[in-house]
Amino acid sequence: MKITAFVADDEPIARAGLRAMLGAFEWIAVVGEAADGESAIQLIEAQHPELVFLDVQMPGLFGTEVLRRLTWRPYVIFTTAFSEHAVSAFELGAVDYLLKPFGPARLAAAMQRVQSAIGEPAPVDAVERLSGALGGGPINRLFVRVGGALVPLPVERVSRFEADGDYVIAHADQAKHLLHLSLARLEERLDPARYVRVHRTHLVNLEHVRAFKPDVRGNLEAVMLDGARVPVSRSRAQEIRSLGR
């Protein structure tokens, strides 16, 4: 029995290339395609494919918004030429993320995940995951780029987040990962009992703080377990000092 699939991408060449590669999988039957978000919603709702390949950045609607608005619940693989969209997407419930350009080997790995997911007796609803991810509740992982792959990073492993213009640098296990979102947006999704904004450009994981100490000029700073020293703003310093009274 074949699994029905749908391809949504605004690039005709990308759609044709993906359909050609999917031809190698005898258990997949591509039943339709769309070039924009609104058309994707209409056709997916009409055809009820079991698997959808969603380009993240399409005219009209992003793929994430398409997923949110669907009443039909397919398995989803996001495709994107821009890693920041996947990196800043929190637990979207997708089976996989494919960074363009990808080839048959990477697609084959994603299809193995599809087979495993479809084999689950009670798969988690992707839209429910998306609602939980973009709605309330703290996140427990991020997706970061390592080489040419996106890998999950548990947030508890991140010692601190540092604003870098419109982006954020996550410091974890002696490595740095660039996240394409604002520090304010990230702060909204972190557990406030663990992650504290100590400065306008710094969020620290209290589990990774060795101590709060004054520097040579008397200004408070957070001394991290990895040896890093993070400045603490005056307003936050007053709050932190009051905790010790």
Image: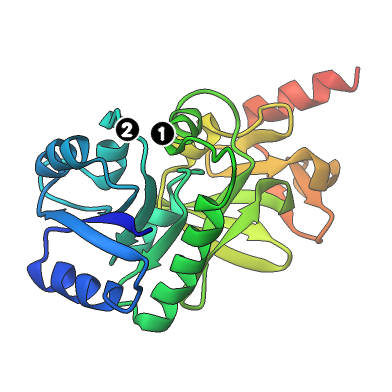
| Horizontal and vertical percent position of residue 153 | 63, 56
Say which amino acid is labelled 2: Arg
Q: Residue at x 44, y 28 (%)?
A: 131
- Name the residue rendered at 56%, 50% in the picture: 142
Residue 15 appears at what percent x and percent y? Answer: 16, 67
* 154 to 101, vertically: above or below: above
**Outermost right residue:** 245
Q: Residue at x 31, y 61 (%)?
A: 79
The foreground one among 38 and 51 is 51
User: What percent of the width, then of the height, locates residue 47?
Assistant: 19, 42
- Whether 92 is drawn above or below 23: the answer is above
Residue 117 located left or right of residue 73: right
Q: Are marks 2 and 1 in contact (CB under 8 Å)?
A: yes
In which image quadrant can residue 242 be found?
Answer: top right
Q: Which residue position is annotated with label 1?
A: 127
Residue density around tag 2, few if under 14, some if 14–19, many if 20 or more, within 10 Å: some
* Residue 41 appears in view: yes
Quadrant where the C terminus is found in the figure: top right
| Quarter of the picture holding the N terminus | bottom left
C-alpha span from label 2 to label 1: 6 Å
Residue 68 - label: 2
Identify the element where label 1 is drawn. helix
